[in-house]
Amino acid sequence: MHEEVSRGTPDLSYCLADPMRIRRASFPKLQSLRPEVSGFKKAEPGGPGRAGSHGGGGEREGPDEAPTPARPGTRKCWGERSGVETESRMVVTSLKLQDLIQEIRGAKTQAQERELIQKECAHIRASFRDGDPLQRHRQLAKLLYVHMLGYPAHFGQMECLKLIASPRFTDKRVGYLGAMLLLDERHDAHLLITNSIKNDLSQGIQPVQGLALCTLSTMGSAEMCRDLTTEVEKLLLQPSPYLRKKAILTAVHMIRKVPELSNVFLPHCAQLLHERHHGVLLGTITLITELCERSPAALRHFRKVVPQLVQILRTLVTTGYSIEHSISGVSDPFLQVQILRLLRILGRNHEESSETMNDLLAQVATNTDTGRNASNAVLFETVLTIMDIRSAAGLRVLAVNILGRFLLNSDKNTRYVALMSLLRLVQSDHSAVQRHRPTVVECLRETDVSLSRRALELSLALVNSSNIQAMTQELQAFLESCPPDLRADCASGILLAAERFAPTKRWHIDTILHVLTTAGSHVRDDAVANLTQLIGGAQELHSYSVRRLYSALAEDISQQPLVQVAAWCIGEYGDLLLEWSSEETEPLQVEEEEVLALLEKVLQSHMSLPATRGYALTALMKLSTRFHGDNKAAILEKMPLVERGGPQADEEGKESKAAAQLSEAAPVPTEPQASKLLDLLDLLDGPSGNAQHPPPLDPSPAGTLAHLLDLPCAPPSPAPIPNLKVFEREGVQLNLSFIRPPGISALLLITITATNSSGDDVTHFICQAAVPKSFQLQLQAPSGDTVPARGGLPITQLFRILNPNKAPLRLKLRLTYNHFGQSVQEIFEVNNLPVETWQ
C-alpha cells in the first residue's frame, strides 16, 4: 500500500508565524469542491489516507497530484488498529475516536482509565512529532475528548494553531474547537491566531467566518478584540442572518472585554432592531442590554426606543412572532424574557419610560397562563420588571399575587423562586406580601431543606408587632421538628423577633424559655446574657421566672444555656422558691434540700460545661446566704442590674446607677486587711467559734454596695474606647466597637456591625480579617449573612485579638457580598485604630 499526499503542500510550521504566507504559497489547483463549502477539497471514503478508512483521513488526489515516493531504506506499513502510517521500527497502535470512547467507558477502575489515557496520549504525542498533516485533526479530536475528562492536554495548543492555519475545512473546524477549549488569556499562544482569524473573517466563506466568530467570542482577549473590531463591525451588516447573529454576539463579548468599543457598535443597533429573524433580534436585544449596563450615555440613548420594544413585545404576546420558536403555546419565551430584562433596565428610576410600559406589563401579567414552565419564566421576568421600575401601586400588588400563585405550584423550583422574590419585596411591599403569610408558613413544612430555609427567612421577615404572637407560635412548632441545620437560624430568629416586638415582659420570658428548652444548644452565645438581663429588669416577675426555670431545670439538665440561666436565677432569687405565689394555678412546693440537690446534680453531671459548673457553684454560695441568713451577705449580695447600651436600657438601670452614686458618697467602714482576707477564706467553711467575724454590715443597699466597692481585688473600670467607622458604600456601613476585658490586658474584643440603609438587601455577606504575625486572631461566627434593606437587623461578628507584645494594631479586612444584583468585594486596611486598643 502506498501513501497518498498532496504535492506542493507548504510547510505549515514555516507559514504559522505569518499566516498570510499560506495564501501566497503555491497550491495545486483544486478540481473538486465541497458542495456546501466552496473552496475546500472533498473528502472521499475508503482506503488508507482517505476519509472513512479505518484510521485515515486523506484527500483525493487532484489531476496534478501524485504520490510522493517513500524514502529509500524504509518500509511503510499500517498499524493493526490505526490509519496512521509509520515506519517499521515504530508501529503506533493508535485508536480511533469512537474506539477510544468505548474503551474509556468500559474501564472498570479509575487506574485502568488513567493507564489507557496515558498510553493514548503517548500515541498522540508521537503522531504530533511525526507531523502527518492528514492525521493531525483526528489526533487533536481525541486529545480534546481527553481534555473534557479532566486530563492535561496542554501539549495540543500548538497543534490547534497549525490546524487553524490549514486551508482544509476539516482541519479548521477541529483547530478552532481546540482553541476554544485549550487556549485562553493566560496563555500567550492565543495571540498567535489573531492573523488567522482576521484572514478567515475576510475570506467570505460563511462556515469559516462562523468558526472564527465563535472562537473570538469565546476566548478573545482585549488585545484581540481591539485588533479585530473592524472585521466584526463589517459582518454586522452582512445580508446573511447566520453571520449577523454571530457577529452581534461577538460584539457583546468585545464590549465586555473593552468597554470603550461601545461607541463602535452603538449606531448599528437601531437598524438591527428592525430585523424579523429570531436570532438576529435576540442577539440585538442582548447587545443593547450590555451597552446600557456599561454606559450611562447608552442608557439615555436607548430610552428613546422603549416604544419600539413595547410594540415588539406586544406583537409577541398577541399575534405571535415566529411559530418555530414557540414553546408549549408561549410565543418565543426566550425573546420575551430578554426584552423584559432590557425594559427593566431602561425603566429603572425613569418615570416616562415606566409609564410607557405599564399597560404592556399588566397585559403580559394577566394574559400569560401559569400552567407551563415557559409561561412561568415570562411571568417571573414580568414580576421583576414591575418591581424594579416606577410602576403603579396596583401593578405591584398584581406582581406579588403572581408570586403567591407560584407558591401553590407543584414544581419545587417555581416555589423556590417565589420565596426568594418575596423575600426581596418584603421590605418595599410589606403589606402586599403579608396577604400570603399563611401560604408562606405552609412552606415551612416542606421536606426540601432549601425550600424550608427560604420559607423560614421569609417568615421571620414577615414578623411585626401585630402578628408576633401568631407567628412565634408557628415558628416554635417548626423549631421542634425542623432539620438540625435550620435549628440555629430558627432559634436566633425567634429570639431577635421577640426582643423587637414582645408585647409584654412575661410573654418575652416565656418565649425565650421555650426556645432554650427546645433548642438550647443551638442558640446564640448572647442568649444567656439577654435573658438574665430581662429577668433582672422585671422585678415583678422574679418569683414567676425562678419557678419556671426551676421546673424546667428539674426536667432536663442537658440544655446548657437553659441550665446556666436557671442556675443564675436560682442563685439570685432562690429564696422566692420557698414562698407561696398566688400567680400560679398549681403552687410549687419546694424544700431547701431539693434545690441544693438539683444544683449538686448539675455540678456532677458529665454534660455540664465548665461555665455551667461555675454558674451552679456561684448559686450554691449565694444560697448559703439566702437560706441560712449568714452574715456574709455583702459579698454574695443580689447582683445589681447591669447597664446595657441600646434600646433595651430601662429605668431600672438608671436607678441602679443612682444607687452606685449614692454609695460613693456613703462613708466606708475601715477594717484591717487581714480581717477581710479571713472573711473571704471563711466563705467555703462552716461557722467556727474561733473565727473573728467583722461587725454586722449596714443592711441598706448603699452600705452593701459600699462594702463591695471596698474589696481589695476590685479593679477600676477601664475608660470606654470610641467606636470606629471603617467602610461605607451605597448605604452599606461597617463599624467597629472595642472592649478590653479587665485582667487580660493583651486581649482585645472587636465587634463588627454591618448596617444597610439602601433600598436593596445585602446577601451572602462575609467578613474576613487578617493581622500581623505577632498577633493571634480568632473569628467568631457571624449572626447571619443577610442585612435587610432600610435599616433592618444588622449583622454582628466578634473578633478576638491577642496582642502579647502590645504592638500597634493593624487590621486588614475583606468584605464580599451581593448588592443590587452585583457581587461586591472590597479589601482594605484599617490602620487608624484608637491607641486604647493596644496600649
Image (cartoon, rainbow, N blue to C red):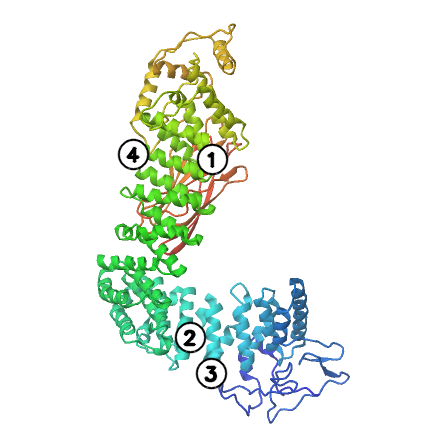
Task: Please report the residue visible at 42 percent of the width from the left and 78 percent of the height from the top.
Answer: 243
Q: Earlier in the sequence, mark 2 or mark 4?
A: 2
Give yes or no for contact between labels 1 and 2 (Cβ–Cβ under 8 Å): no
Identity of the amino acid at label 2?
A: Lys
Which of 254 and 651 lies nearest the eye of the viewer?
A: 651
Read off the residue under disc 3.
205
Residue 808 marker: none
The x and y percentages for residue 837 are 44, 33
Label 1: element kind = loop
Give yes or no for contact between labels 2 and 4 (Cβ–Cβ under 8 Å): no
Q: Earlier in the sequence, mark 3 or mark 2?
A: 3
Read off the residue under disc 1.
559
Of all residues, the one furthest to the right in this rendering is 73
Read off the residue under disc 4.
504
Q: Earlier in the sequence, mark 3 or mark 1?
A: 3
Identity of the amino acid at label 1?
A: Gln
Label 3: element kind = loop
Q: Report the mark closest to the observer, 1 or 2.
A: 1
CA distance for labels 1 and 2: 64 Å
Identity of the amino acid at label 4?
A: Thr
Considering only vertical position in the picture, is 48 above or below 17? below
Considering only vertical position in the picture, is 470 above or below 583? below
Q: In the drawing, does residue 69 fall left or right of residue 419?
A: right
The x and y percentages for residue 671 are 44, 8
Read off the residue under disc 2.
246
The x and y percentages for residue 769 are 47, 43
Q: Report the mark closest to the observer, 3 or 2.
A: 2
CA distance for labels 2 and 4: 66 Å
